[in-house]
């Protein structure tokens, strides 16, 4: 039996690191990327200790050409079966009139274009084989406008709509595509938050939900369901009502989180 080759971006911490741990076994070849070489090495060692074959590389997912070159080389030697386009960053909420341009651009470069840079080089390869599975990590924040986080909510909304639209075409090629929209998960990204995080999930539980939904090739995996329903309802309201509710959250969410991955 051949090994399943799994690519995970943003694997040096959080969801990506836990995905690597949960997929690690003797029948898996994990290809993991991240921005921190030190943290990525620790994840690679942990996965290897569980029996997985591991290939680790620090690379910037926002670098389109570097990603295309590297992924072409990797897939030629080890055809990729499953992709988790997980790399992402979140901007810390601060008291300010508007989000600085450099922050918004950085968020879109990683959260949206980083996903595209991961997926587009692999689509022709998967098409030629007539199989493959792709998971895109978005967020419940991508359901609509979120007070004081335009770059984050905007980039996550863009990648959600892009991924769900792409699914219609790629499924005819034998390729599955699932968009994952988590709520609050206890990770390094949320550890600095100083505002209430309803229905906060532990990392292990959240990744189990993600893996189950991706394995079933669901169109969208949005969880936890109470927060997903609440978020959907909020943004289904008339804009005047939803905007009023969102404005009330701004003071509570301005207590200094930070830009992180």
Image (cartoon, rainbow, N blue to C red):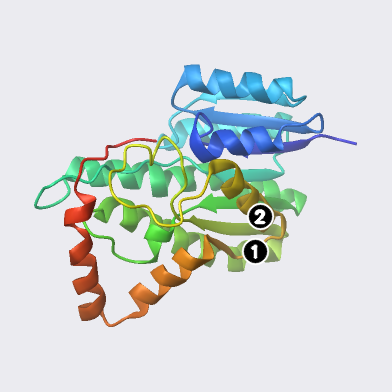
Q: In this view, does 114 lie to the left or right of 52?
A: left
Q: Do the residues labelled 1 and 2 touch (CB within 8 Å)?
A: yes
Tell me which corner region of the image, top left, top right, bottom left or bottom right, holds residue 105.
top left
Up the image or down, 148 lies above or below 26; here it is below
**Residue 198 vs residue 189, the one in the foreground:** 198
* 148 over 242 or under it: above or below: above
Q: Give the labeled residue for mark 2.
A: 214
Left or right, 44 with respect to 29, comes to: left
- Residue linked to disc 1: 218
Q: Nearer the viewer, residue 101 or 116?
A: 101
Q: Residue 110 carries which label?
A: none
Note whether residue 238 is visible. yes
Image quarter of the C terminus: top left
Q: Position of residue 93 (x, y in %)?
A: 22, 46
Give the residue at the far left of this rendering: 97
Disc 2 secondary structure class:
helix
Q: Which residue is drawn at 69% across and 66% down?
A: 172
**Horizontal and vertical percent position of residue 235:** 34, 73
Number of marks in the image? 2
Instruction: Return the residue found at the far right.
Output: 1
Name above or below for residue 241 compared with residue 125.
Answer: below
Q: Which residue is drawn at 54% across and 29% down?
A: 33
Image coordinates for residue 142, horizontal then vertical, percent? 39, 60
For marks 1 and 2, give the CA distance.
Answer: 6 Å
Q: Residue 54 occupies which quadrant of the picture?
A: top right
Q: Report helix, strand or loop for mark 1.
A: loop
């Amino acid at each position: 039996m051949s090994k399943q080759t799994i690519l995970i971006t943003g694997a040096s911490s959080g969801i990506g690191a836990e995905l690597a741990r949960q997929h690690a076994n003797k029948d898996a070849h994990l290809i993991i990327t991240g921005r921190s070489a030190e943290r990525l090495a620790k994840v690679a060692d942990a996965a290897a200790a569980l029996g997985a074959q591991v290939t680790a590389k620090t690379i910037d997912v926002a670098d389109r050409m570097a990603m295309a070159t590297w992924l072409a080389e990797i897939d030629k030697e080890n055809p990729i079966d499953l992709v988790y386009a997980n790399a992402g960053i979140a901007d810390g909420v601060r008291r300010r009139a508007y989000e600085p341009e450099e922050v918004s651009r950085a968020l879109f470069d990683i959260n949206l274009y980083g996903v595209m840079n991961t997926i587009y080089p692999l689509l022709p390869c998967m098409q030629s084989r007539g199989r493959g599975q792709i998971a895109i990590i978005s967020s419940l924040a991508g359901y609509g406008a979120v007070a004081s986080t335009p770059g984050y909510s905007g980039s996550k909304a863009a990648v959600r709509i892009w991924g769900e639209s792409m699914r219609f075409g790629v499924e005819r090629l034998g390729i599955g595509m699932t968009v994952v929209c988590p709520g609050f998960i206890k990770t390094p990204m949320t550890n600095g938050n100083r505002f209430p995080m309803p229905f906060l999930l532990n990392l292990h539980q959240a990744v189990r939900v993600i893996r189950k939904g991706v394995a079933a090739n669901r169109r969208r995996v949005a969880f936890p369901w109470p927060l997903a329903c609440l978020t959907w309802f909020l943004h289904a309201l008339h804009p005047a009502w939803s905007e009023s509710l969102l404005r009330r959250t701004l003071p509570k969410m301005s207590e200094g989180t930070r830009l992180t991955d």
